Amino acid sequence: MTLVMGAYFFFIAFILAHLEIQIEGPHGWAEKLPTWRWDSPGVRRWFGKPVTGYHLCLVTCILLFLHVPQFYGGSWEREADLLAMFFLLTVTWDFLWFACNRHFGVARFRKGQVWWFPAWALGVPQPYLIGIMLSLCAALGPALWTGAWADRAQRWGLIFGELLAMTIIVTAFTLRPRRRYSALPRGARGAVKVKPK
């Protein structure tokens, strides 16, 4: 794991957040999308929210793409790095959805405002803390046989700090007052109706 890799994964998280904002708009967790939902008291107890076909397919697709390098000389250490980065990616991407979504924003990112995150701790949804801990565990996993605990912990901490700093910078930009549609070209403002041929 390197700083370049951290910046690359941040860029992926940033693009994924904006892609989901374009798809979901103000309705998080695929609330208004035509996708299947697996929802029951058991699912809510384990996941805290329904499992959707949209999210299952998207996360699976990302995991498959992240593992392409394993076909070109894979190793357990690389697998651990990929999984560590994947868990950090999901936390970063999800928070950026809130920070960059003009329909939601950071002001509404709190307990009671986000129905799909019922459990919070330390001011963030519990799945964020779980994702960070899974990332750290994955990053430290190879140290079980290499003994390089300090090196792997330091590299993970550097990447975590980089992603956190970049997230704070983007969030600071989103908190500035914005003029509506100021960044859009003149012809792209508002809804466009397309007439069938």
Image (spheres, rainbow, N blue to C red):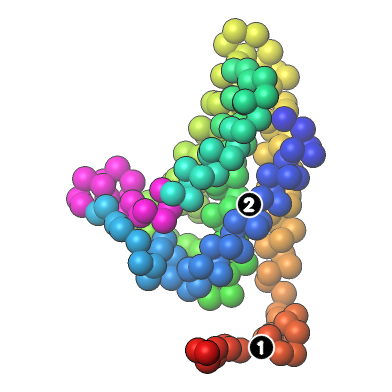
Q: Is residue 47 magenta?
A: yes
Q: Does 62 sit left or right of 160 as displayed?
A: left
Residue span colored magenta: 40-56
User: Which SS type dominates the magenta stretch?
Assistant: helix
Q: In which quarter of the image is residue 83?
A: top right
Where residue 197 sits in the image (x, y, percent)? 52, 90
Circle 2 residue:
13
Answer above or below: position of 145 versus 45: above
Q: What residue type is labelled 1?
A: Arg
Where residue 126 sits in the image (x, y, percent)? 44, 46
Residue 186 in sight in this render: yes
Which is nearer the N-term, disc 2 or disc 1? Answer: 2
In this view, which residue lies farthest toward the right?
4
Q: In which quarter of the image is the N terminus?
A: top right
Q: Residue 95 versus residue 112: which sits nearer the camera?
A: 95
- Disc ID at residue 189: 1
Numbered disc in front, either 2 or 1? 1
Answer above or below: position of 87 versus 191: above
Q: Does 90 sit left or right of 27 as displayed?
A: right
Q: Does 121 sit left or right of 178 as displayed?
A: left
Where residue 173 sits in the image (x, y, percent)? 73, 67
Residue 117 in sight in this render: no
